Amino acid sequence: MSREPLYIEDLRHQLLLPSTAQYENLLQELRTKRSQIWSDFYTTEAMLTDEWKKPYYELRHTITRFAVHRFHFKICTMSPV
């Protein structure tokens, strides 16, 4: 979202671990997944507010479902490659 390193990258650097083939494969997979996220997803209500993350928030399911539905709608309207 903001060019932040992936959590797995932070862990490797903090723990001074080597870069293995498995690590590089996972990193590539996570970067690919990140690049496939529809950019408008980050402007949905669920991403713009923190209110729904609070305990016992009554409408959490509504906000998160609307965010996912808009994302799902975008996928469903894309033509196959």
Image (spheres, helix red, strand yellow):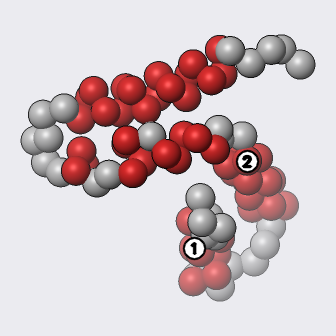
In the picture of the structure, the residue carrying the numbered disc 2 is 35
* Residue lying at 80% horizontally and 67% vertically, measured from the top left: 20
Whether residue 8 appears in this view of the structure is: no
Q: Is residue 28 above or below residue 66?
A: below
Image side of residue 76 versus residue 56, left or right: right
Helix, strand or loop under label 1: helix
Q: Position of residue 43 (x, y in %)?
A: 49, 45
Query: Which quarter of the figure has residue 28?
Result: bottom right
Numbered disc in front, either 2 or 1: 2
11 and 52: which is toward the camera: 52
In three-dimensional space, the C-alpha distance between marks 2 and 1, rounded to whole angstroms, equals 21 Å
Helix, strand or loop under label 2: helix
**Callout 1 amino acid:** Leu
Query: Which quarter of the figure has residue 41?
Result: top right
Question: Reading the chain from its start, which is encountered first: label 2 or label 1?
Answer: 1
Q: Is residue 13 above or below residue 1?
A: below
Q: Is residue 51 above or below residue 12?
A: above
* Residue lying at 65% horizontally and 67% vertically, measured from the top left: 3
In the picture of the structure, the residue carrying the numbered disc 1 is 11
Whether residue 64 appears in this view of the structure is: yes
Q: Position of residue 77 (x, y in %)?
A: 68, 15
Q: Is residue 54 above or below residue 71?
A: below
Q: Residues within 10 Å of mark 2 (few under 14, many from 20)?
A: few
**Callout 2 amino acid:** Ser
Q: Residues within 10 Å of mark 1 (few under 14, many from 20)?
A: few
User: In which quadrant is the N terminus drawn?
Assistant: bottom right
* Residue lying at 64% horizontally and 75% vertically, measured from the top left: 12
User: In which quadrant is the C terminus drawn?
Assistant: top right
Image side of residue 42 versus residue 20, left or right: left
Q: Position of residue 15 (x, y in %)?
A: 58, 82
11 and 22: which is toward the camera: 11
Image side of residue 34 versus residue 7, left or right: right
